[in-house]
Image (cartoon, coloured by chain):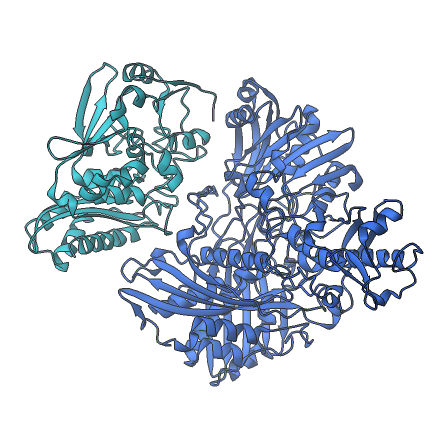
Chain colours: A blue, B cyan
Amino acid sequence: MTWYRKLKGAASLGQPLDRVDGRLKVTGGARYAAEYAVPNVAHAVIVTSTIAKGRIKAMDTSAAERVTGVIKVLTPFNAPRLPGAPKPGPHTESAAAPRPASMRVPTMLQDDVVRYNGQPIGVVVADTFEHAREGAGLVRATYASEKPVLDWSKAPLNPAEEVHPLGGERTVTRGDVAKGLADAAVTVDHVYVTPLENHNPMEVHSTLAQWDGDSLILYESTQGITSVRNTVARHFGLTPDKVRVVAYFTGGGFGSKGGPWSHETLAAMASREVNRPVKLVLSRRQMFGPVGGRPRTEQRVTLGATNEGVLTAIRHHSKSTTSTIEDWVEPATNQTRLLYDCPNCETQYDLVRVNVGTPTFMRAPGESTGTYALESAMDELAYALKMDPLALRKKNYAQNDPESGKPWSSKALMECYDSAASRFGWANRNPMPRATRDGKLLVGWGMATATYPARRAPAGAIARMMPDGRAYVRAGTQEIGCGTYTSMTQIAADALGIAPSMVRFELGTTDMPENPASTGSVTAASTGSAVHDVAVALRQKLVQLAINDPQSPLHGAAETDVRVDNGALTLLSDAHRTEPYSALVVRNGSRPIEVTVASKPGADAQQYSMHSFGAVFAEVKVDPDLAIVRVPRIVTAHAVGRILNAKTARSQIVGGVVWGVGMALEEETLIDPRTGRYINADLAEYHVPVNADIGTIDTAFIEQPDEHVSTVGAKGVGEIGITGVAAAIANAVYHATGKRVRELPIRIERLLT
Amino acid sequence: MIDFDYVRATDLASAGRAGAAPSTRFVAGGTNLVDLMKLDVERPLHLVDINDLTRADPTLAAIADLPNGGLRIGGLARMRDVAWDAKVRERYPVVSQSLLLAASGQLRNMASIGGNVLQRTRCPYFRDTAMPCNKREPGSGCSALVGINRSEALLGTSEHCIATYPGDLGVSLVALGATVHIYTPAGSTRTLPFSSLHVLPGAHPERENVLRPGELITAIDLPPLAAARRSLYLKVRDRASYAFALASAAVAVDLDGRTIRDARVGLGGIATKPWRSHEAERVLIGKPATASTFHAAADAALADARPHRDNAFKATLAKRTLLRALTEVTA
């Protein structure tokens, strides 16, 4: 039982508290990495390759060096060698050398090899950004160019034994899929394709590097200050304590800022070379390639079922692209092993290495692409069975994790189905495709299941009670736009028994207690538990101080007799014996009372299967002549444990749904088929939804606090919102038109008949 | 972007003189030029800002009645001002609609009419200096012919260039038969039909229009045209707003009962310049306003379409777009 549940009337947790940093953000007071004013700062602009594969023979930097204000031009031919730079993968697409899936292998002017078009191959440093940019435009590279491997259908498949999905195996089997398919009365077997995509947070990646002797400060736009610190330190052969990373605000990351890429180290390298602080901001074009993206996937899903709709076999093979720098596997089949109760299941990964930038985590990596394939296949199976798609899912509802047999730590998926279906009006659906109209427009209704793992990682926090009754709480996490400042403030306030306005929560530097990167929806469960634990510990310390203090009105009372409300310690047995935190601290010398905790997951993670679930229902309207698809309405229900803040949690779901609309209908990174050049590398041509694309988004949470996952009962809400959305829309498009589009995005030409 | 100098012209004569110098560009809203300068596609050494010209001559940004019943739009009028002007909306709905369906609210607040009609192509190869492009660098080759060419044109192309004219307003203006007034550095003015302002790429895609160095568009005249009151701009694109046309149609129809007395047809998103389809107009004029007439007009409009690998669908889409526009405007 957690503290705040015992507290009556104090609970700010779950309330739709406005963001505590909202005013700073809307007034420009929130400072982002590139906005720090550092004296004597120089500006760096990256030069990128214009071929996709080959070697750089020479780089002519003379014109750039003649530009007024240009201080230094770094190229592979003059850049200092870094003692700890990782080696990019072999310069082939089919090498069998061991290449375990790694997180990020950056390219930092350590060799003359070009591995994709747009790869960093130089840095121009100047007194102003404008001079640096002009210089960068004048650097000329000559290449020994080779024909790049870009056609993924012709690229060699990896040697099977070389595929290592992060934390998994290439092939996972349970039961006997061949027998399950043989036993099936109905089977469906189709391939679903998702394209290359790029994250495009509003704030481009940026770094401000400043050396002081052999110590380095990085003001950084990141989701993971600790991994930036550790990686950049390793590149330079420094111990991590020599590097301090600061990120008070990050303008979105979505996985592309989960750890460092090339530009952090390049900024630090440039700063050391010119002996000045250096600011390096990527251009929007440079967001395509050097900082990751979603790989293309081709997923074959085979389902078998009895005439009653009971699944007898599930097979899901996913092939995805990676770079020639490192192997990164989009974990698109993970949800397939646990979403439905089926004794026979086989999942498998393959990779093709092409000359593009290395892919990486992108909002719900795996589950976003994987649920598109699986939930489209389930829809196809429902039609093959002449069964309602929702009824098919309910028929195969997994009461326990079908892979491990473990019980769920919590699961309210059935309630999600019912809530969303009822609010959507699913019962009124005419099952016939192309049978519902609104005037000229075809109307389609589709649904899908949403899911994402609930993870928790070790996290630390420090808390101080000040003489004025305010609490300072610090944790080295990140604010990437999710509302972490706010939700952590609420957790600390409730646990301490004070108003949120009396809490100042701070984050974003590596000299604070270490926390996980803000990735994988872990922050609420991980940092949230640490903040909760440290606030409870501080409260207990203060209560102890009071009952042991002869001058306190609470002296001699039992700890269990003390409640804290609005900053006042009061005996349950005698409301007249009371004093505020502030009086207690002042009387004890006015020194802040401080507590530090390290919090980590318990044994529950071994005993339970921990996942979040949800349901997505989508309505589309399709112009039958012009093939324009609009999404007037999406209804969701999600069970993500305890809701820490109703407003920021809803925002996470809405953001995920909006992205899902983009994934379904608009998003695709285009690569020139001969040169590997990123073709739509700007926000005018790389389409994400605009406001006019979005209709009603009706969200709901089935709140079921899960204390197996985290002390605060939260499971995380950052990623699940996008999962299932593309499938629900694709299924609705089929219902509207009778045409099944198995490749995203569902653009006009894919629907035009 | 390279270093450049910048002057603000205060009168047409000085603007014309400054603008005639080599490596010089006029700038008004800057929404297209500055973007291309950042990409190093445009590399002028001198910019002449013409926004202050309206102080000496407010008519340069005005929207005024012409004695013949038409309307004169100043070259420095902003897209927003024209789009929301009551006279434009009443007499030339197609002009207002084509403006409002273009760009974004912020861009429309900035962009001038003279600059808008000269907007340069969105061809991705034109906009990327790492790639060959005959329009940007004559003789270097056309990457779009064998590259990703979904956004490229089907009409008016050449073996040297298939880049699409990206604008919307120009499609309406060419359909209506507008006239362009041009100030020349010699101090005189000349006028020409809007349809003659832009040129086909042919062997010289680097030439997009007939303006000579230092020449400025001072005004565009909309003619008195009965059909214009029954006009419509339909734009089909990949998202609901802030996207260039995959296909668009500007149509104006004057009906006599259910017989088409006069018709104007412009097509966007599929041609190398603002495209007027006289072929479609010939099919329409004198015929009954029926689905079969419209089908025949759409077929005629796209009869010369030359698709490439990724954009063949746009021929179908353009026909359907025109068909829909004609159906709606005559409903």
Determine the residue positioned at 54% across, 23% down: A131
Q: x, y (%) of residue A296?
A: 51, 55
Total marks shown come to 0
Between B289 and A321, the one lying in front of the other is B289
Quadrant housing the C terminus of chain B: bottom left
Determine the residue positioned at 53% across, 29% down: A141
Q: x, y (%) of residue B283?
A: 10, 50
When the figure is inspected, residue B106 is found, relative to residue A505, above or below; the finding is above
When the figure is inspected, residue A118 is found, relative to residue B13, above or below; the finding is below
Report whether residue B272 is seen. no
Q: x, y (%) of residue B143?
A: 38, 38
Between B228 and A13, the one lying in front of the other is A13
Between A656 and A69, the one lying in front of the other is A656
Between A370 and A552, the one lying in front of the other is A552
Furthest residue in direction front, as rendered: A576
Determine the residue positioned at 85% across, 52% down: A584
When the figure is inspected, residue B298 is found, relative to residue A285, above or below; the finding is below
Based on the displayed image, in which of its 4 quarters is residue A320 positioned?
bottom right
Q: Is residue A325 left or right of residue B268?
A: right
Q: x, y (%) of residue A266?
A: 65, 34
Q: Is residue A123 left or right of residue B95?
A: right
Report whether residue A293 is seen. yes
